[in-house]
Each structure stands twice: as C-alpha cells, then as structure tokens.
Amino acid sequence: MVESVRQPAQRTVEFGIYRDGDNNLDESQGVTLRQALQTSAKDARVEYTVEDTTSVGTGRLRTDSFTIADGGIGQAAIGGPRDMASEKNLARFVAHVLDNAQRSGAKQTWIELTDHGAGDGGGLEADSAGQIMPMPKIAQAIADGMKMHAEQHPEDADRKVDGVVANQCLMASLGFADALSHAGVRFLAASPETMVSPGVPSNVADAIAKHPGDSKALGNAIVGDVMHQNYRVDGDSWKPAAAFDVLDLDPAKMRAIEGSVKTLNDDIASRKDDKSEIAAIRQDAKAVEGMVRFPEATRDMPWHADRPAIALYDTIASDGRLDPALREAAKNASSAVRNIVVAHKESGNFKAFDGSDYTDAAGPTVHFPVKPAQIDPWAPKVSETRNRFFDETDAAAAERVIA
C-alpha cells in the first residue's frame, strides 16, 4: 500500500511580519506573533513568514526566522542579530516572503512592518545599529525585494507585494503612500497618528484573506479589526490606534494627488507678496491641529506639522478671504486625497491620550509647517522633506512662504 502524500494547502494570503524588536517595544509587540499563531490555527488560508529580531527571554539579541501556518511553526532558524534598519535586509526579507508566496500558491502577499514609525521621516529603529531607516529607503527596499524575487524566479515575475501594513506610528502619510505606489504596492494600511503598542492585531491577515477581490470590503475589515481591538496595558484596557486608514495606491490616483497638491503649492507660493492671503492660509493651517496629540509630546516633535490632508485642504477651500482659484486648487487637492481612502475610522475621544479628538483624521497626513521651528527639527536623522513627494509637489516653495 502506497502512503498518500499530503499536499500543502493553497493559501490565499502570504503575510510577512518584519518585526524589529531591537528597541523598547520588543516585549509588548511580541504579542503580534502569538496572535498570528492563534489566527493561523483558525484560518488555513493564511501563512505568515516572520523575521523577528528580539532579546525577550534570553537577555541577548538574536534573529528568529520562521513560518506560521495551521497553528504551527515551520522553516525555523535562529541566528545572530540582523540590522533591521538595513535596506538590504528588508529587501532580502521581502524576496523571501514572495518566494514562500509562490510555494504556497498565495493569491496576495502583504508585508507588515512592526516597530517605531516616524511618518515621512521613516521608521524601523534599530537601537544596536543606532539608526532609523529613512522612508524612501523602506519603499525602495520593498521594490528591491520584488525585483530579487522576479530575477530568481522568472516564472513568477509578476508576483508583487500587494499591500503594506504599518504597525508603526504616523505612517498614513501622503509621502509614504506615494513612495509605496511608485514601488508597485497597491494598498497601505496605517495610522496617521501615534499608536499604542502592540498595535495592529495579526488577525488583519484573516480579514485580507476573506476579501481578496473586494478592496472596499477588505479595507473595512482591516480597519474594523484594528479599531475594535483591545489590549491590556498598565492594568487598563486600550485600543491600539486613535485613527486608522486603508489607502488605495493606484498609480493614476496617486498621480492625481501629486498634480493637484503641486498646483495648490504653486498657487500658494505665487502669492508670496500678498500678506493678507498668506496670513489667512497660515491661520487656516493652524486651525487644523497637527498629529502627536498626546500629553508627553514635546514642542520640537516634527509631526506637529503633519496635518490631516483632507481637513487642511477643505479648510483652505472654504475660506472666503482667499482667491477663488486658490480655493478651487485646495478643493481639487482634497478630492484627490479623498479618492484614495478605501476605509477609515477615527476616535472622537481617544482614551489613551487623555481623550484627544481625532475626528478630522479621516485619511492621510501631509507635511505643512506654519513656523520655522516645524521645518525638519530632527534632521538629518529624521527628515520629512527628503522624499520624492515633497520634491514633486513643490512643497518647499509653499513652505518658504507659509513657514
């Protein structure tokens, strides 16, 4: 009698978790891996590919690599600590996830970045390496990983990273969305604000698997899973995010944003000699509170100038003191940004941050400083202006006039 060979399940989603525990979030964000084990036991459509740099339980930093599927661990390897803020390391991981997606027959591949986040400044803070990966390099690493997989597996060259989940603060920004779109990524799931660790629950992979062909249902499921999650932190119950979005990074939609925001910035810059209009625009921008709305936020934090883009542009568009052409430009910019928001949810009373209100955070942020101190205060380590979107939209010209 010939023993039958069990074939591996055809997966719907290959979900890569790139978890940088080389910092103070190591222990708390480790919860995401336990969640992945629980989710995989219930849903055979999902396989997780994990790279986890951690010191929890050993006191010494190491890197664990493994897969999670059907409630168990596979491909397990333990090695020396890798620099998780290295562009080359992230690219190699992305290629590995895509390799596993090909093997598992997954219809979609998503990458979750788990660590500190710094918006357009970047993220993936590796304490031992003393660096943060700049945002453009994060996007480039993902593109490089896709290229590596295509070169090594030409028969599967069309496979790509369909979505990025940013389990990090402040990563729902127009700059990051634009960079990922140019890297070939279709969706970004992220918060425009700071988050409470452990952050995004791993069961969002299950939400993606349930709606592989319906972006609206997929977005609503992801946002619902995040905003309904509760964690026990310091003896109390907290939700992980004050606001969360799923953005559609369709290239045509992103080009529309680039063009409309550039037109608005150019219109603002052209009015540099009109003191009354410039004062009105500055007043409008100040009325839209920037991000980092928590009690411990210091005055030098750059994200005070990261304003909810839709709220900012709507405020400018509705200001009767301004020239009709400028107001129309702001209206068009708002419409273009609104067009990429697949799903969102925000809190009108976020308990974790002394009841801060985020009801204007219905979509991504845009860097819009209103005073010199808000222009790249932490550069060069964290720079929100050294990226493609800032350059392509002539943001510096508007910044010089307003700030």
Image: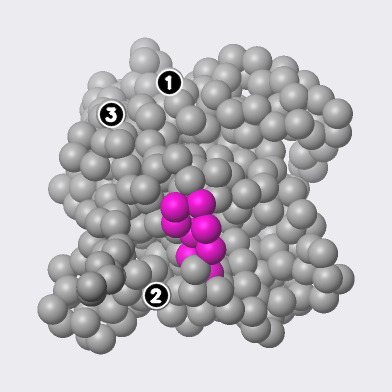
Left of 197 or right of it: where is 259? left
Residue 322, magenta (yes or no): no
191 w.r.t. 13: above or below: above
Q: CA distance from mark 2 to mark 1?
A: 45 Å
Q: Nearer the viewer, residue 376 or 339?
A: 339
Q: At 55% across and 24% down in the image, what residue appears? A: 228
Residue 85 visible in the shown view: no
Residue highlighted by disc 1: 315
Q: At 62% across and 49% down in the image, what residue appears? A: 34
The span shown in magenta is 66-73
Left of 333 or right of it: where is 252? left
Q: At 62% across and 72% down in the image, what residue appears? A: 64
Residue highlighted by disc 2: 96
**Which amino acid, mark 1?**
Thr
Magenta stretch, main secondary structure class: strand
Label 3 SS? helix
Residue highlighted by disc 3: 217
